[in-house]
Image (tube, grey):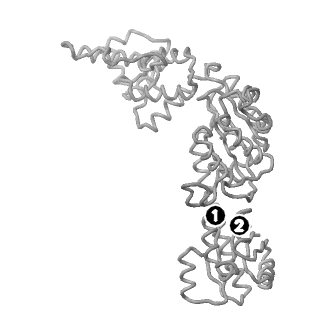
Amino acid sequence: MARLLVVDDEANMRRILGTILAAGAHEVVEADGLGAARRAFSAAPFDAVLTDHRLGDGVGLSLLASCQEVDPTVPVVVMTAYATVELAVEAMKQGAFDFITKPFVPETVLAVVRRACERTNLLRENARLRGQVERLAQPTTLLGESAAMRSLRQLIARVAPTNATVLVQGETGTGKELVARAIHEASSRASQPFVAVNCAGFTESLLESELFGHERGAFSGADRLRQGVFEAAHHGTLFLDEAGEMSLPLQAKLLRVLVNGEVVRVGSTSPRLVDVRVVAATNRDLLAMVRAGSFREDLYYRIAVIPVEVPPLRRRPEDIPLLVQHFLGTAAQELKAAPRALAPTALAKLVAYDFPGNVRELRNLVERALILARGPFIEEADLPLRGEIVDESTRPDPLQHAVDLPATVEAFERDLVRRALVAAAGVQAEAARRLGISRSLLSYKLKALGLASCGVGPTTDVKEP
């Protein structure tokens, strides 16, 4: 069953068309002119529109243009009793789905509507699948085996199936949007849009337009109608990042949407129903802001139905090795950089650091080190932490004086082979694999470099299977 908008200024013609469409089990909404049709189309979604060309307050082609601005996926069928080739060509050029002449042949009308609705379903399904692909491309796995992360995942699992509004709190860089995406992906809305907006990234007037949309001419520069993120997230999830940055007047308008499920575009007085789950996030103390009068108390309790706290990285240092391994792998692929391992002393340095920038800072450090490290291992010097100054001019220049190149290369090779053996727990077959050489070549090098008798563990002499 499809939801159809029928526009004709003759009541008898609307009745006839409604009877035909009802026989096809369609839901029909009637409008007697352009004004009524535009109000109906803006108030709720339709699968197709059938409009007479000659209306009392305008022509059907004007309605066609209005519908395309609001939702270009909805096909518009133009009907007329005064068919001409010129009118049919003009209608199709402007984007009409089909052209029907009066009097109607019921079978023809139903066939056109069926094809129009099939097109609507196809376009919307393609948009849904594109959204799914984009969401799947986003990393939604919350990595970590610490008690804090296990508790967080358990809370998400309980919260996600509901429609409750969620407030995600945590320091900058802890991964609040990742939590919001995880809630969305585990909910019944997972196949619908996930739309994110950073409230701190707009001025007050622009944020209102971004949230609720605007009508053409609503303000200077508004040369066309624009849908807001609430409408874009219809049936899905809207993530409001940095929600504490909204002004008090805008907080009042957000509260109205959360209470009534209605948005009013800037420059309009007509409310539009939306079905959206809101997940808000902030790194600020909203209760302190409520006490200071800079955040509405009623809005706080509306968005904080389920508060979720994301732990800072310093409270879960045992997760750092796992995160480092993950970032090394993803960064090597994304940056097309040579894969590198982290030296034990470098990893110890990261685990001991308190990471004021949290996971975001850790990822930044790993990516930079992956690009700038000079050897196959990322060393402590490749990981300058906040406050540490790296002066490249202080690094020794190996060509400042004469060098013994063979001895330098041999020393580097000896150190590299030793490291590979340590990383492989002394298993020579595994060490050879890590070095990218054969087992026999490694055996030769161990002897040539004087390492054959320098065991690194009880399994040094394990033979290849």
**Res. 240 image quadrant:** top right
- Answer whether labels 1 and 2 touch (C-beta < 8 Å): yes
Disc 2 marks a residue whose amino acid type is: Phe
Q: Is residue 256 left or right of residue 199?
A: right
Which of 386/268 is in front?
Answer: 268
Whether residue 363 can be seen here: yes
Residue occupying the point 79% across, 84% down: 16
Question: Disc 2 on helix, strand or loop?
Answer: helix
Q: Give the labeled residue for mark 2.
A: 41
- Of residues 203 and 407, the one nearer the viewer is 203
Residue 137: x and y in percent read 56, 45
Q: Nearer the viewer, residue 146 or 189?
A: 189
Check the image and report above or below for 425 versus 240. Answer: above
Residue 31, position as x, y percentages in the image: 75, 74
- Give the quadrant of residue 282: top right
**Residue located beneath label 1 in the image:** 71
Relative to 18, does residue 74 appear above or below in the rendering? above
What type is the residue that disc 1 sits on?
Asp
Viewed as shown, does residue 60 lie left or right of 342? right
Q: Residue 155, image x and y in percent?
A: 75, 32
Foreground residue among 16 and 371: 16
Task: Give how far apart the Cα atoms at labels 1 and 2 are.
Answer: 9 Å
